[in-house]
Image (cartoon, rainbow, N blue to C red):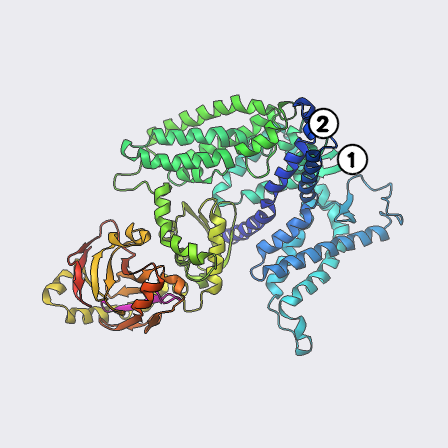
Amino acid sequence: MKDKIFGVLQRVGRSFMLPIAVLPVAGLLLGIGSSFTNETTIATYGLQSILGNGTMLHALLVIISKAGNVIFDNLPIIFAVGVAIGMAKAEKEVAALSAMISFFVMHASINAVLVVSGKILADGSIADNVLDGTIASVCGIQSLQMGVFGGIIVGLGVAALHNRYHKIVLPSALSFFGGSRFVPIISTVVYVGVGILMYFIWPAVQNGIFALGGLVTGTGYFGTLVFGIIKRALIPFGLHHVFYMPFWQTAVGGTMMVDGNLIQGGQNIFFAQLASPDVTHFSADATRYFSGEFIFMIFGLPGAALAMYRCAKPEKKKAAGGLLLSAALACMFTGITEPLEFSFLFVAPALFAVQVILAGSAYMIAHVLNIAVGLTFSGGILDLFIFGILQGNAKTSWMRIIPVGIIYFLLYYFIFSFLIKKYDFKTPGREDDDEETRLYTKADVNARNTANSRQSETDGKQGGTDDEKSAAIARGLGGKKNITSVDCCATRLRCSIENPELVDEKLLKATGAVGVVKRGQGIQVIYGPQVTVIKSNLEAYLAQAGEGDEVDRPEAAQKSEQSATDSQSEAGVSEQMPAESVQLQTSSHILYSPLKGKAAPISESPDEAFASKAMGDGYMVMPEDGTVVAPEDGTVLFVFPSKHAIGMKAADGMEYLLHIGVDTVKLDGKGFEVFVTDGQQVHQGDKLMEFDLSFIREHAASEACMVIFTGLTNADSLNLTKEGMVDRLEVIGEIHK
């Protein structure tokens, strides 16, 4: 039950990310426009001749300010559409349109009931007995002031209707209205009823929200401390968006009259005050939900990074330093803390507990010191400059962040240093000698991603099934059939899956992930800021991968299918091998060339991805002709749609990849003829494929063929005993296990 709830909350949280993602640009537009059209700011810096009223720049900045403000004014419908898109499982564009229609219908229905009940008079004015602020204009419709909650109600409801009815089959006479066309129809009908119900229900709900907001705000500085601790504690679970969003965007975070308008939510209050020319100091009661982030993101966590670096083993400091420096800079400038937090979260949870407490206290201290710096996304230097420094210390008290930040830098540094040394926490650079500091270094990430880099340059934009990194991610998630939804937030790939047991964390980390969070059917794979590209590539890959593609054959299924034939295949190999080879098989895997040509170590491959052994150790053959045979008895795991590569599994369980040429994926199968299919049993010498060698030489980067063993461990070693010209099925080396 808990896992199911977590999965639902994860989906809701990720659905918030699309509308939240637009807030940074809206905030920047509003911040820059309002800052440089403010008469006080212009006078302070003596810019009347450049930015004064009547100048071209003043007019442009007014436009910029209005462009940013319109997004905040219409957040409810933005959330309605964004949440519907995020929660819909397919045909998301239909869900978006249905959500927009439903939003208008709901508020139009509420308006009609308000008119009928006499709360809105015939001339459009509001009756005297109506509480100020409870009725407001929503996209030009006078309706109940539901704020972002109204958009969320629409988005979640429409998504539920969409997921249930987008494949509905109606009787023949009504078949035109079936399928996805039925979704906006049923949504319209439902939200007429929802609008009528909201007239009766929302006032009570609103009173409850105000009461909850009053409870939070009424607890003063202690309430701020609790908020900060809870928000940071939810980071590992990816549920912090669900928690903080109501405080930022709804009355839970407080209400305030700004320029005659009732504004709800801490972030909304800040930006309303930012746009107001009459505010002398921004409200710290509104900004207490985020001002403290500047203290620990710009100062505190970099102190923790320095502590981890100083505590690293001398021989591993260079590797650890690359990781920690890049993570610290990302934290300081963008406010993205997860690369740093996850560098110690799983190896030393006690350090994360310290981070949670210190970060929570930073929120409270900022509130106590009346620091009122706003933000759009996270507490990095950019937001500090726009919404703190540019607004002036008189309005924000931003200068108090610096001395407090220095104190927090020292606190993080000395506390982390003490705990790491005392308890020998295996933070980056302190791993055991046989473990490589490799998860976060730039060089290692590049190595892991290089396997896909060349292909992504040519066909990643096309979103084809040729994306090998996406294929690896899909396999790590248990295969295409195991993946029910794919989405992302700022740093995490968020997926819902059918069977969590099929998830391969090692394979996912091999694709560049810095961490994997599993909660029931919800899987979060942490990649960092580049996750949006990874998500798009994966969606395109899954959309085009057919039922026979390798992602539909998760490892567990392959093992099941193979178990029945393993003993038979092993016997076949033994009969064909010399006696000494049979003896060696107990401790070695004999390598037979699948091609005729010139054999060489994989390090001599003309492709950097293979030469660096990013995908595994192996060897290469410069072919003399275009015939490829099975080097040994085994099973075909998969054939790439572009026919340029075949995944194989030997009788002893050894898995390897036969990859023909460099950049041949872009040929879309031209020049290749494959004679086997997924799951087929093959014997040594069976023809796997033929390729046009002349065509490959002319249209590909190289004709070099690679044999890559993907499942080798650090204890395994590949020894190439024969280099130069080899014939098909000639013994050219062995793998010692």
Image vertical order of residue 435 relative to residue 383, above or below: below
Say which quarter of the image contains residue 177: bottom right
Amino acid type at image mark 2 = Glu
Q: Position of residue 307 (x, y in %)?
A: 38, 29
Q: Position of residue 74 (x, y in %)?
A: 69, 46
Quadrant in which residue 182 is drawn: bottom right
Residue 111 in the figure: left or right of residue 397? right
Residue reaching furthest to the right: 122
Q: Is residue 693 above or below residue 603?
A: below
The count of marks equals: 2
Inspect the magenta stretch and tell me whether residue 156 lies in it: no
Q: Is residue 66 left or right of residue 365?
A: right
Q: Is residue 178 above or below residue 725?
A: below
Residue visible at 24% across and 61% down?
Answer: 622
Which residues are drawn in magenta? Answer: 631-646
Quadrant of the frame with the C terminus = bottom left
Helix, strand or loop for disc 2:
helix
Taking the magenta stretch, the answer to whether it contains residue 640 is yes
Q: Which mark is residue 407?
A: none
Who is closer to the viewer here, 470 or 414?
470
Q: CA distance from mark 2 to mark 1?
A: 21 Å
Give residue 39's mark: 2
Which residue type does callout 1 highlight? Gly
Position of 276 relative to 80 (above/below): above
**Residue in front for this viewpoint, 694 or 195:** 694
Residue 64 appears in which quarter of the rendering? top right
Residue placed furthest toward the left: 580
The residue tagged with tag 1: helix, strand or loop? loop
Q: Is residue 534 visible?
A: yes
Residue position marked by numbered label 1 in the rendering = 260
Left or right: where 632 falls relative to 353: left
